[in-house]
Image (cartoon, rainbow, N blue to C red):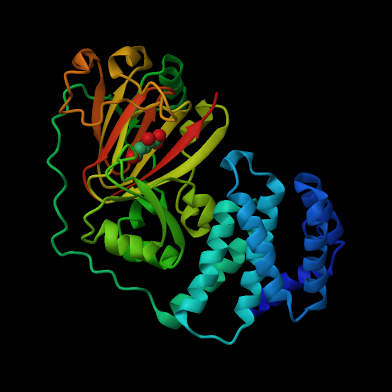
Amino acid sequence: MLNNLVTTQLNYFKQEDKDPRFNCALVTRKICDQVGHSVTPFITTLFDFVIQDHPQLLEYTQEVYDLAWEKLHIGQWNSVKQGWRTMYSLSCWIHSLLKCFQENTTMQHWTSIIERCDMALMMGDDTYSDCIHDLVELVHSHVIQQFGLPTIIIPDTIEPPTKRRRIEQSIPHVQRLPLSKFKEHVDKQEPVIITDSIQDWIAHQQWKNPKYLLKKAAYRTVPIEIGKDYLDQDWTQKLLPFHEYLRDYVYGTSTKTGYLAQHTLFEQIRPLSSDIEEPMYGLAFGNLVSRNAWFGPKGTVSPLHTDPYDNLLVQVVGEKYVRLYSNSENERLYPQTSGLLTNTSQIRDLENVSDEFPEFKNAKYVECTLQPGEILFIPKLFWHYVESQSVSFSVSYWFDK
Ligand SMILES: O=C(O)CCC(=O)C(=O)O
């Protein structure tokens, strides 16, 4: 099956007239218009080599990859021209296809193909993402078939959840909330918890089972934030195979906190996205701007911050303590005054606040321990502090008006 897919995908470029994504002249023009005509020889040679099954194709694809990789790392991410991202995905995809033909049965060979496809899905553009999804999912199944699932030892005595915080100013909890009533909360920008709206998500039943997650994503590469929180001096990010993240950080003994945080995991790993669906309460807003995964062990912290979007934070597995302050409390919350993080408070530990911030104790807030199956509405620009009380998996949906 894998060989069939690889042959079929490589042939797409030989049937130029069918789909503009595989029309070499059109793609070349599009990329060159975006990044400049100096790359024309690179792209045309790449396509010529694909069409001729040229013996140097693999090496040449690596050269195109190296060039695109370099360009992706110049300047700010959002100023990178789209054409470099198309070129990056294209080179990752063709390189991966050719590697599938090599007679090499080591696990490392196959996982390096998965890694390259994942990099394309994370850093490339969408032009070839359907093809890359199809390829990486088949290679992933192939690896599981050939080499099995990695074993992760889940401690018998999973640490008990952190002692629950006493909830004094609880966010209202509502069952069977009609959309029309929910819209009233949105109009008034009032936080609310809906307790019973994701019960039929597959994720709600299955994601608490690490073996289920491994079947779907064990060998996929994911970005992990390392450090107590993103204000930590030593905070850093690294890419890891998902099973290593589970083994070392979620169920393991790493002394550092690892958090798969604010990642568009469902755009990257399709088999997980079919386990969730946008809550119907999304109809109360305008467009869905982004959908992010937040998966980690007990003790992950998202420090007190604001986002410029209305948010439905869906708690799928485990518990999280959440505290919310309206944006009318801004002055009592001491936002950072310079740098990139002016949406984040200078106060990191809500229980031990320095005398430098005397007004903090007067700020009014609401709070909850968010439980599996619940959806929390966090209005746009509300300050939120989030701390996991156990292994936890949440999905956030950000909307604009
Ligand atoms: O769950 C978390 O750790 C933070 C969630 C968050 O900040 C968000 O959804 O905007």
Can residue 242 be seen by looking at this rendering? Answer: yes
Q: Quadrant of the N terminus?
A: bottom right
Q: Position of residue 91 (x, y in %)?
A: 67, 64
Residue 186's place in the image compared with 316, above or below, is above
Out of 385 and 66, give the one closest to the viewer. Answer: 66
Residue 272's place in the image compared with 57, above or below, is above
Q: Residue at x 28, y 69 (%)?
A: 152
**Image quarter of residue 47:** bottom right
Q: Position of residue 287 (x, y in %)?
A: 58, 31
Residue 316 lies left or right of residue 109; in this view the side is: left
Residue 281's place in the image compared with 221, above or below, is above
Q: Position of residue 147 (x, y in %)?
A: 42, 81
Out of 82 and 157, give the one closest to the viewer. Answer: 82
Residue 83 lies left or right of residue 385; in this view the side is: right
Q: Residue at x 61, y 77 (%)?
A: 99
Q: How many marks?
A: 0
Out of 375 and 84, give the one closest to the viewer. Answer: 84
Out of 326 and 306, give the one closest to the viewer. Answer: 306
Residue 379 lies left or right of residue 227; in this view the side is: right
Q: Residue at x 60, y 46 (%)?
A: 74
Q: Position of residue 3 (x, y in %)?
A: 64, 80
